[in-house]
Image: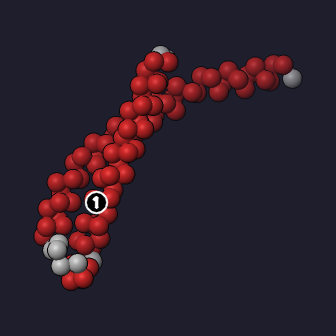
Amino acid sequence: MNTGLYLLARKIHRTMVLVMVVLIFIMSPTGAIMKFPEISKTFSFINPLTARYIHNQVSPFFSIALMIMLLTGGYMYLFTLPKKTTDTTSKQTNA
């Protein structure tokens, strides 16, 4: 496995974490308004239909960012496995 590819995966993963935070700030209130429509009575600037529209428009980007995070996180996990197994075998042979 390539160290440069690992560093690229880590950089992409960290960027996607920030993207997910922004998307969660959008999707959480809209999801809450869809689940509990009485919230929109308190906040009159957004109605449930607008919340649904915004939530539906943002959700594909959320899914794509989540999938990219899954793939890069999986690669980073698999990249460290050979190092972990060789470290434990060398400790067992030295003991």
The one nearer the camera, 31 or 45, is 45
Q: Quadrant of the C terminus?
A: top right
Residue 63, horizontal then vertical, whole percent: 28, 47
Residue of label 1: 27
Whether 17 is drawn above or below 90: the answer is below
The one nearer the camera, 12 or 34, is 12
Count of marks, rendered view? 1
Q: Residue at x 27, y 59 (%)?
A: 26
Residue 82, horizontal then vertical, whole percent: 59, 22
Whether 23 is drawn above or below 87: the answer is below
Residue 92 falls left or right of residue 84? right
Disc 1 marks which amino acid? Met
Q: Residue at x 38, y 33 (%)?
A: 12
The one nearer the camera, 78 or 57, is 57
Residue 88 falls left or right of residue 27? right
Residue 68, horizontal then vertical, whole percent: 34, 37
Q: Residue at x 45, y 31 (%)?
A: 10
Q: Residue at x 50, y 18 (%)?
A: 3
